[in-house]
Image (cartoon, rainbow, N blue to C red):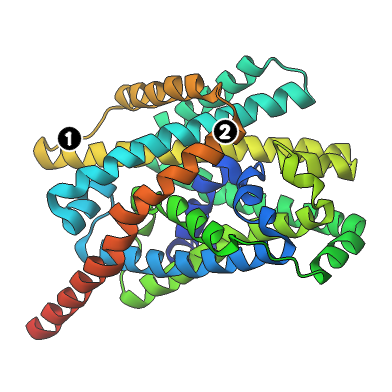
Amino acid sequence: MGFLNSRFFRVYLVPGFIFQSVIIGGGYGTGRELVEFFTQYGPLGGLLGMLITIIFFALVIVATYEFARLFKAYDYRTFFKKLLGPGFIAYEVFYILLLILVLAVMGSAAGSILQDYFNIPYAIGMAGMVILVGLLNFYGREIVTKTLAYWSIVLYAVFIIYFIVALSRFGGEISANLAQGEVLKGWGLGGFKYAFYNLAIVPAILFSVREIETRREAIGAGIISPFICMIPGLLFHLTFIGGYPEILGQQLPAYWMFGQLGITWLMIVYIIVLFGTFIETGAGFILGVIERIDAYLEETRGTTLSKPLRGVISAGSIVVAVILGTVGIVALIGKGYGTISWAFFFVYIVPVLTYGIYKILQQKKQESLSA
């Protein structure tokens, strides 16, 4: 446990693990997002799209981490008040919409998996999962942060085992499909759009960068975070190539691929890990709202939310998500996520890469003059 408590782990790896943990349950963990934004553009087209995503992730995350460090903005309200002034409310509106969509997708996927594999009624599986999300968040930031970071390590172990097994079974098909070099129109836009809406969560998880003290650390953590986030996606995409193009029509592509392997114990482990990612995603998204409320209350009243109030906020989000979850996971990802990604592009990504960088440079100039 020494390494897990080291400064290197807390500064350079924890932000990336938390970023990965929060986005992976929304549709990434089921494989649906990866097919929607990458694999459908062909084996090689998907890889090129992921490269676009990683580069764009790095540019925005580095700027965001450094902005947060300089202005000590560790919740999204403080961050956007520094960046947009009164316009900070625009991000909040779209973030709440994204929160509802993600929780709905998560609940829908959980219900589908339990019903299909364990024959548990859809509603029971979905409700049970979202209750666990609220319960975890009830205990606060420290527990959520540790759970997200440590579960990501477990997730990596399972992904690596899965990849090795899948490669041994479908290596020939993967090589053959890659050799064709298929790149379909839209691969670049798919990579950009995936980055747009996933980056939206970064300002809400800035509690994870409190340990960053220097610009070098902000840049280092900002470059590492995209790789931590996307490596499991890369492994999934490579294995999906073995089932291409049949996999494009699957509601839960990752679940389908595990089924093709025909290894029961690996499927069970996958389902357990996937449930963990759903819990991580919900807890992380809700914690972002709670951190924002806490910052406001501390600023205006010198206090923070009590545990019961945290539970009320979590329960409210979950109830709405359960209702929306009945729409269906594919429709939610294809319509909801695809549209909302552009909103975050204009209210977060453009401002932080323009005015945000300008303020960073101005702050650096002021520090140099005062020194």
Amino acid type for the residue under numbered disc 1: Thr
**Which corner quadrant of the image does residue 307 belong to?**
top left
Residue at position x 78%, y 57% in the image: 241
Secondary structure at badge 1 equals loop
Q: Is residue 121 left or right of residue 117?
A: left
Task: Evaluate whether residue 351 shows in this view.
Answer: yes
Q: Check disc 2 and report the residue beneath it.
A: 331
Residue name at image x 21 percent, y 67 percent = 355
**Where in the figure is residue 152, as x and y percent of width and height?**
59, 51
Residue where numbered disc 1 is placed:
303
- What is the CA distance from the residue labelled 2 to the residue labelled 1? 41 Å
Q: Position of residue 90 (x, y in %)?
A: 24, 44
Eye-nearest disc, 2 or 1: 2
Q: Is residue 119 left or right of residue 38?
A: right
Earlier sequence position, callout 2 versus callout 1: 1
Which quadrant does the N terminus fall into?
A: bottom right
Quarter of the view holding residue 67: bottom left
Tell me if label 2 and label 1 are in contact, CB under 8 Å.
Answer: no
Residue 351: mark? none
Left or right of 118 in this view: 168: right
In the rendered image, residue 83, in percent from the top left (x then y), is placed at 20, 58
Q: Name the image quarter holding residue 301.
A: top left
Judge the density around disc 1: few (<14), some (14-19), many (≥20) Cα neighbours within 10 Å.
few
Front position in the image: 176 or 91: 176
Q: Secondary structure beneath disc 2?
A: helix
Q: Residues within 10 Å of mark 2 (few under 14, many from 20)?
A: few
Amino acid at circle 2:
Ala
Of residues 119 and 137, the one nearer the viewer is 119
Q: Residue furthest front?
A: 185
